[in-house]
C-alpha cells in the first residue's frame, strides 16, 4: 500500500532540505510517496498564500493533492483539527533538522502523533 507524505521544507525542498518548522509558513512542501515502508518518489509542492483561507488554506491544498500523512514541527490547533477532519494523519518531527532525517524517523516508527501538547498559539514564534 502506498501513500503520500508531506513535509514542510525550506527551499528548494527535497530530502536534503531543512525542515520548515511551522507548517503554514514554510516555503514549499516536500512530497514523499511511500510504498511498503520505502521511499518511492520525491516531489515538491509550493505552499499557498496564507491570506486565502487563513491557516486552513494549506490544509485544503495538501488534502487536494492526495496527502495522507504530514510531518511537522509546529502547528496551531485549527490546522491540526482541519487535518483530522480531512483524514490526514499528522506526526511531530520537530527535532529533525532535515526532511530526509524526519522521513527516516517516520519510516522507523519513531515519530509520535501530533497532539495538542505540540500545538502553538499561532504567529511566528517558531
Image: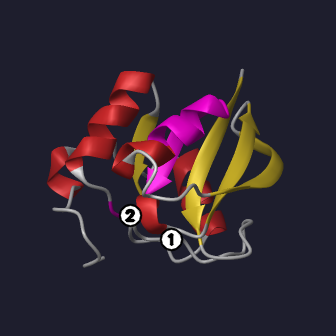
Is residue 84 depicted above or below 111 in this figure?
A: above
Q: Is residue 121 visible?
A: yes
Query: Residue shown at 46%/44% (left/top)?
Result: 57
Q: Residues within 10 Å of mark 1 (few under 14, many from 20)?
A: many
Asked whether 64 or 105 is in front, the reply is: 64
How far across and how far down the image is residue 111, in percent? Answer: 41, 51
Is residue 30 depicted above or below 65 in this figure?
A: below
How far across and how far down the image is residue 19, in percent? Answer: 54, 71
Q: Is residue 93 visible?
A: no
Direction right: furthest residue: 41
Q: Quadrant of the C terminus?
A: bottom left
Structural distance between the alpha carbons of marks 2 and 1: 8 Å
Residue 49 magenta-highlighted: no
From the viewer's perspective, is 36 left or right of 115?
Answer: right
Q: Secondary structure at mark 1?
A: loop
How far across and how far down the image is residue 8, in percent? Answer: 54, 61
Query: Residue shown at 52%/77% (left/top)?
Result: 97
Direction front: furthest residue: 52
Query: Residue shown at 72%/20% (left/top)?
Result: 1
Whether pointer 2 and pointer 1 mark residues with C-beta atoms closer than 8 Å, the reply is yes
Q: Which residue is mark 2?
A: 73
Query: Residue shown at 48%/52% (left/top)?
Result: 71
First to last magenta residue range: 59-74
Q: Which residue is mark 1?
A: 20
Q: Residues within 10 Å of mark 2 (few under 14, many from 20)?
A: many
Residue 72 magenta-highlighted: yes
Asked whether 108 or 46 is in front, the reply is: 46
Is residue 112 depicted above or below 81 in this figure?
A: below
From the viewer's perspective, is 9 left or right of 44?
Answer: left
Amino acid at each position: 500500500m502506498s501513500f503520500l507524505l508531506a513535509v514542510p521544507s525550506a527551499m528548494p525542498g527535497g530530502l536534503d532540505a531543512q525542515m520548515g518548522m511551522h507548517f503554514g509558513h514554510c516555503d514549499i512542501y516536500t512530497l514523499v510517496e511511500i510504498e511498503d515502508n520505502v521511499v518511492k518518489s520525491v516531489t515538491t509542492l509550493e505552499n499557498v498564500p496564507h491570506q486565502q483561507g487563513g491557516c486552513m488554506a494549506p490544509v485544503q491544498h495538501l488534502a487536494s493533492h492526495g496527502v495522507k500523512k504530514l510531518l511537522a514541527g509546529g502547528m496551531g490547533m485549527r490546522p491540526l483539527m482541519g487535518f483530522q477532519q480531512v483524514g490526514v494523519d499528522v506526526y511531530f518531527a520537530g527535532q529533525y533538522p532535515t526532511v530526509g532525517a524526519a522521513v527516516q524517523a517516520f519510516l522507523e516508527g519513531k515519530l509520535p502523533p501530533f497532539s495538542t501538547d505540540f500545538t502553538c498559539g499561532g504567529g511566528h514564534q517558531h
